[in-house]
Amino acid sequence: MPLNKEINTILRIALKEDIGPRDVTTAFSVPKDTQGKVIIIAREHGIMCGGEMVRAAMHMIDKTLSVKIIKKDGEMISRDDLVIEISGSLAAILAAERVAVNFLSLLSGVATATWHYVKKIEDTNVKILDTRKTTPGLRLIEKYAVRMGKGTNHRVGLYDGIIIKDNHLRAGKMLRGSHICSERLEEVIFGMRAKLKMPIEVEVETLAEFDMVAHQNPDVIMLDNFNVKTIRKAVKIRNKKFPKIKLEASGGVNMKNVRAIALTGVDFISIGSITHSPKSFDFSLEIASVD
């Protein structure tokens, strides 16, 4: 994990939030010179992610702490696996414990949720994409966790990718009533291609919109909340008339229907839940020895 300035800032804010002026419990119960070792153990099966966040959090409190990362990010872990060992001042370790394990649990949860979807469709050529439905301020590390779960990052933000969505169509006067104005959409896409070197994606909500937008030759068309039957129809039209256009299925994707969606022949499936509501991965930090 590349620990850049933004991630270090996130860690400092989180530590300040948790510790405040001082850890009063530890200050009055654990002598400052007490040394020891703690271990972090996985309590379930999944994908490890966030080891370097643990190291960085610990070193922000005490640079002399020894942090041994046993399981690397992206590695499969099982219940009772030892993933990290930390040695040094127990007072310092206890101060950083909750923040360190919170990030480890969050990122391993995102990576594991992603991996479950990827595993479900691993025999297809479909890529699982993340979205911008991330925890505010934590997007970079959550998207990193998606990669560790073998998923693929969509655009990072509004600055590095183009997706013309329903609200853009309305605000940009690309709608006439409930119908897309092909002339106005063509004008917008032409202007983007003239000034920007980015793939252009357009969201559609019906087959009629899909057919009209496809004639404008965007790089990708997002099929928003299409059911499996309608996705198949869109794929059939694409394959016959617009073979160069990539298709992304989005909306309402879950573990029960992701495989059926993948088998329709789309190129991408975007899933907001892998970052906006992953299950927190269960880890336990335990004191292994006190010197």
Image (spheres, rainbow, N blue to C red):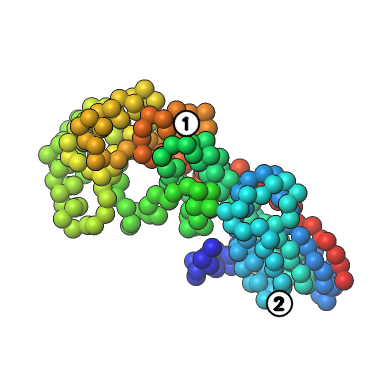
Which residue is at a point 17% across and 36% down the rendered structure image?
215
Question: For this view, does 179 lie left or right of residue 86?
Answer: left
Q: Amino acid at mark 1?
A: Arg
**Spatial CA span between label 2 and label 1:** 48 Å
Against 285, residue 249 (above or below) is above
Question: For this view, does 13 lie left or right of residue 156?
Answer: right
Camera sees residue 173: no
- Residue placed most toward the observer, 59 or 231: 231
Label 2: how many Cα within 10 Å (few below 14, some 14–19, many 20+): few
Question: For this view, does 98 lie left or right of residue 11?
Answer: right
Q: Residue 35, position in %: x, y?
A: 82, 72
* Quarter containing the N terminus: bottom right
Q: Amino acid at mark 2?
A: Thr
- Residue placed most toward the observer, 212 or 171: 212
Against 189, residue 33 (above or below) is below
Question: For this view, does 291 lie left or right of residue 182?
Answer: right
Camera sees residue 279: yes
Nearer the observer: mark 2 or 1; the answer is: 1
Which residue is at a point 26% across and 47% down the rendered structure image?
200
- Residue placed most toward the observer, 102 or 150: 150
Give the SS element for disc 1: helix
Which residue is at a point 53% across and 53% down the rendered structure image?
148
Say which residue label 2 marks: 64
Disc 2 and disc 1 in contact, CB within 8 angstroms: no
Q: Residue 62, position in %: x, y?
A: 69, 74
Which residue is at a point 50% across and 70% down the rendered structure image?
5
Say which residue label 1 marks: 259
Identify the disc placed on residue 92: none
Q: Residue 108, position in %: x, y?
A: 60, 51
Of pointers 2 and 1, the one earlier in the residue sequence: 2
